[in-house]
Amino acid sequence: MDWEARVLEALRNSRPHWDAPPDWRAVLALYGGLGPAEAAALDRTLLTMIDLGYRNPHAERELQPFEGVEVSLPAGMAPEDLLCIEAAVLVAAHRGLSDAYFPFARLMSLPTWHVVRSRLTWLDREALTVQRQLALTRAGRSLGALLGLAVGDALGCTVEFMDRAAIRRRFPDGHREILGGGPFGIPAGGWTDDTDMAVAVGRGILESPADPVDAVGRHFVAWLKSNPPDVGNTCRTAIAAYMRLGSWELASAHVAAELGKWAAGNGALMRTLPAALAYGCDPAQAIRIGRMTHPHPESDAAIAIYHRTVDALLEGAGAEEALAAGLSPLPGAEPPVAKAIGDLARRLAGVKDRPAEQIRAGGYVVETLEAALWAFLRSQSLEECITAAVNLGEDADTVGAVAGGLAGAAYGPAAVPRRWSQRLRDRAVLDELAEGLYGVFRSLTIGN
């Protein structure tokens, strides 16, 4: 089936008279009566159109006399190409095609877009609505999750290690603005080891999706050698051991022997979000990456619960439903991990209804997960969630980052307050990483 020809024919035939605009819904009508395979083929065709470089081979290339005085189109583009792009975006949004999110975001960021959008009949009016619809697909929520992590980290760094009373004295109405500072002098809009290490995990996954440990490890080593201001003791111990021993398995064993139960810090949980974006509901790779520095069943369990909760949120589940997925028994889990998941599930039962006085926000992985879930389950927006998390004090940047990942996955990128997202110093890193990790997820999904 030549879907490019069918799309263009539908648009041409939708004009009620010669000077009326085509109706994009004529392309949507093409799905009527299609089986799954044909519908998927039409989806793929439309996705190729969401690009200013798209040229429909069946488009009329000769300009009509009145078109010569209109705003110029990009080189080689005919008006009918633009009609196809417009229809493709609108149909993709209507059908909730996750793969359209990043192409449409790129389209709107091009300087040329502001020139051609005035020639779009429907999309010029509906671009914001379309953007919001696509932002709530898995692709959009993936970016939202990374942004949530980063702004939670950037907000929380100011009050890291402060107790709640001290935060209230300094910020009587609560700490709500990204100011930087804190014990490590983070610049406003910068982030700490939480986001740095999450980016390292994400980049390692992109380099070697099937077996990411060594690639992630190279990024850990490069990060530590850059002399970051904030490095957790357990992570430093593990990376230094790797640099001495040349094996992550040996480095992990060294941490287990040296730290014992103190290996259950939150340093693996804080950075695990990219694995949830890439690997779907299976936390096996996330646990492997976590064990590089934090070889402890409670860390494994927290990672598994967080990973599966985030995955359910990315798929559109509500907060309670997502947490139920996260707390369910993990098939094939090693006995110590299965026991730790069960113990955590019992501890987290009813966490939403606990008073703040019963919530700790320390560096113990169980406390961090509990505090992040408490903030997430009690809130109705990303901003409310993250501010509740960081105002708990103690390990505020990490709790803010972990809670922000949950909220971003639930509410999408549009929920991140603009005054926060515009403060981020390296926003482009997150955009690129989110698209890459979504690509890994899609490749693994198609492969399975």
Image (spheres, rainbow, N blue to C red):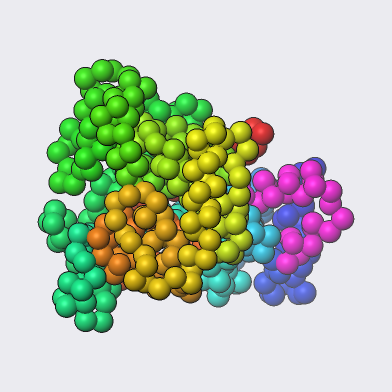
**Does the image show residue 155?**
no
Name the side, left or right, on which 417 lies relative to 8.
left
The residue at 33%/20% (across/down) is: 250
Q: Vertically, is 327 above or below 223?
A: below
- Residue 179 visible in the picture: yes
The image shows residue 121, relative to residue 47, as above or below, that is: below
Residue drawn at (39%, 36%) of the image = 296
Q: Say above or below: 120 vs 103.
A: below
Quarter of the image for residue 218 reads top left
- In the picture, which quadrant includes the C terminus? top right
Residue nearer the viewer, 345 or 73: 345
Q: Position of residue 292 (x, y in %)?
A: 36, 31
- Going by the image, does 436 lie left or right of 16? left
Horizontal side, residue 300 vs residue 165: left or right: right
Q: Position of residue 78 (x, y in %)?
A: 58, 55
Which residue reaches farthest bottom?
173
Q: Position of residue 229 (x, y in %)?
A: 15, 46
Q: Nearer the viewer, residue 257 or 446?
A: 257
Q: Which residues are magenta?
A: 25-54
State the residue in front, 41 or 8. Answer: 41
Residue 222 screen position, x and y as percent: 24, 32
Residue at screen point 67% across, 47% down: 45
Say if the magenta span includes residue 55. Answer: no
Q: Main secondary structure of the magenta part?
A: helix
Give the number of callouts.
Answer: 0
Q: Quadrant of residue 86?
A: bottom right
Residue located 44% across and 38% down the image: 297
- Magenta-span inclusion, residue 38: yes
Indicate the quadrant containing the N terminus: top left, top right, bottom left or bottom right.
Answer: top right
- Is 67 situated left or right of 14 in this image? left
